[in-house]
Image (tube, helix red, strand yellow):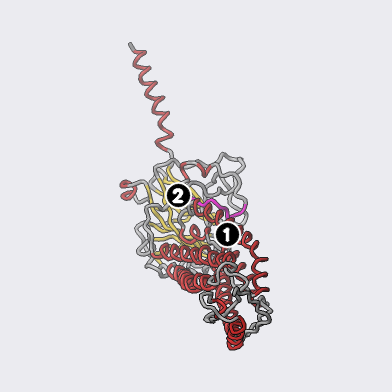
């Protein structure tokens, strides 16, 4: 009877040993976005180690804070010491969109620690920094999800923890899940992998850091939700960016191509093509583009970010200036033609050719200045939906194809200009300026041919337009 008793004890011991590693398993999450990698590990002594690694250059400082906004949030800011290469830890407290103040004697005191080995190695110019802080057991008892904010600055502070911090370059949200097992360190002597590329539906799909290599580790469930913020409501910053992108997409990618295609396809069909072209490209598009463009600087101001430092910002200023120049050139050409300053035997002076080339350049440049990458880097949220890229790709093919197809009407346009034929009419019609009237166009009246010619020719002289030949075919 003793054998079954020993068997029971032995089986219980084996079961306990089987569960023992799971009981002592450390919890945490890891992940990367464009600017940094974060690794958070909850230890069995109720402390948490946070490791931050920059992926973007130059590194000024990195920071994380506990909460969903900067106001009234404890933060830890770290940066390398330029004198001896050590890491400086600054304990701060946020007061809204102001420089965080130094926090003395916090309830949870962070302490610098050495980063532990990881399954991947940062880039050659990356810096790994780590600190340990007591866990917020009350909050973790309610939910294993910890919401944090992160920030990246490009300007290096001084060599003291209380040094002045210049505004951050990018900031966003973090979400750490402490209900999942943390990835253990690699065995001694193993070959580490490169930093993982962002993965999962809430991670960036493009790489802005050197050689992402194999990202198998960070494609696991442990790392797909670190930079997720689906439950974080949009603030004014996100709303301004959305309005900025939407209005400029409508203005540059819908209205301007539509106005150009109308001019290309209908100028040989109806004399009203110019009014439609001008109404779309200037009357409607101008306020849409200007208002949408102003939303960009407003979004930068709302985020306390620097102006004119990114390629997107610089190209945006250049694109707006190019469009305003195009509008001015179009008005200049129309005014000269309306005043009769353009000879009728020169329908395409250099200014007209420049106007066409400049218009095509504005639209083509706008297709490349979409700012798709800016959403993730400016807000810290996930990338845009794939349908945005698919729609952009399809539209970028349709618009050039439609314009090139419209060039087949150029011979007809040149013929009408040589023959002074009104678009949509026959050879009895001649090109007239806006507001001009001629009995040649009135087919309901029975005029003498010579009288009609004299009256029409006189009206052309009064409008300062030269007419070399007018052919009139009239049936008696």
- The residue stretch that appears in magenta: 202-210
* Sequence-earlier tag: 2 or 1: 2
* Comparing labels 2 and 1, the label whose residue is closer to the camera: 1
Q: Position of residue 220 (x, y in %)?
A: 49, 41
Q: Residue furthest front?
A: 476
In the picture shown, does residue 396 fall above or below 216?
below
Q: Is residue 309 magenta?
A: no
Indicate the quadrant containing the C terminus: top left, top right, bottom left or bottom right: bottom right
Indicate the quadrant containing the N terminus: top left, top right, bottom left or bottom right: top left
Circle 2 is placed at which residue position? 226
In the picture shown, does residue 61 fall above or below 389?
below
Q: Nearer the viewer, residue 60 or 255?
A: 255
Q: Position of residue 106 (x, y in %)?
A: 36, 60
Badge 1, how many Cα within 10 Å: few under 14, some, many 20+?
A: some
Q: Nearer the viewer, residue 251 or 64?
A: 251
Q: Nearer the viewer, residue 462 or 394?
A: 462
Residue 307 visible from this viewpoint: no
Separation of marks 2 and 1 at Cα, in angstroms: 39 Å
Q: In the picture, residue 109 is in which quadrant?
A: bottom left
Q: Could you tell me which secondary element the residue under label 2 belongs to?
A: loop
Give the numbered dot on residue 399: 1
């Amino acid at each position: 009877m003793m054998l079954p008793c020993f068997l029971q004890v032995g089986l219980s011991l084996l079961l306990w040993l089987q569960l023992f590693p799971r009981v002592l398993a450390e919890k945490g999450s890891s992940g990367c976005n464009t600017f940094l990698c974060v690794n958070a590990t909850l230890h069995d002594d109720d402390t948490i180690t946070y490791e931050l690694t920059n992926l973007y250059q130059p590194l000024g400082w990195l920071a994380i804070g506990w909460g969903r906004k900067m106001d009234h949030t404890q933060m830890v800011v770290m940066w390398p010491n330029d004198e001896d290469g050590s890491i400086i830890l600054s304990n701060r407290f946020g007061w809204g969109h102001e420089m965080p103040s130094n926090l003395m004697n916090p309830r949870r005191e962070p302490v610098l620690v050495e980063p532990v080995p990881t399954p991947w190695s940062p880039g050659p110019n990356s810096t790994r920094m780590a600190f340990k802080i007591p866990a917020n057991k009350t909050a973790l008892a309610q939910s294993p999800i910890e919401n944090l904010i992160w920030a990246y600055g490009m300007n290096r502070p001084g060599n003291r923890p209380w040094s002045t911090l210049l505004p951050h370059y990018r900031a966003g949200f973090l979400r750490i899940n402490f209900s999942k097992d943390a990835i253990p360190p690699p065995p001694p002597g193993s070959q580490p992998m490169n930093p993982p590329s962002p993965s999962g539906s809430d991670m960036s799909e493009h790489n802005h850091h050197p050689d992402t290599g194999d990202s198998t580790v960070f494609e696991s469930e442990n790392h797909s939700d670190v930079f997720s913020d689906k439950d974080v409501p949009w603030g004014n910053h996100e709303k301004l960016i959305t309005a900025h992108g939407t209005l400029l997409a409508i203005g540059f990618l819908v209205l301007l191509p539509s106005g150009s295609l109308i001019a290309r396809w209908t100028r040989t069909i109806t004399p009203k093509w110019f009014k439609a072209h001008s109404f779309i490209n200037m009357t409607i598009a101008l306020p849409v583009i200007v208002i949408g463009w102003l939303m960009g600087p407003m979004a930068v101001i709302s985020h306390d970010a620097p102006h004119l430092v990114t390629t997107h910002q610089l190209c945006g200023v250049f694109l707006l200036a190019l469009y305003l120049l195009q509008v001015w050139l179009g008005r200049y050409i129309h005014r000269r033609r309306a005043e009769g300053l353009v000879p009728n035997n020169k329908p395409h002076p250099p200014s007209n050719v420049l106007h066409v080339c400049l218009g095509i350049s504005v639209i083509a440049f706008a297709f490349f200045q979409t700012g798709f990458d800016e959403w993730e880097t400016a807000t810290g949220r996930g990338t845009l939906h794939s349908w945005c890229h698919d729609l952009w790709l399809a539209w970028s093919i349709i618009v050039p194809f439609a314009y090139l197809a419209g060039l087949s009407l150029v011979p007809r346009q040149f013929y009408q200009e040589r023959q002074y034929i009104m678009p949509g009419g026959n050879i009895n019609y001649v090109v007239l300026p806006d507001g001009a009237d001629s009995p040649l166009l009135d087919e309901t009246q029975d005029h003498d041919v010579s009288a009609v010619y004299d009256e029409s020719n006189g009206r052309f002289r009064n409008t300062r337009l030269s007419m070399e030949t007018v052919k009139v075919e009239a049936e008696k």
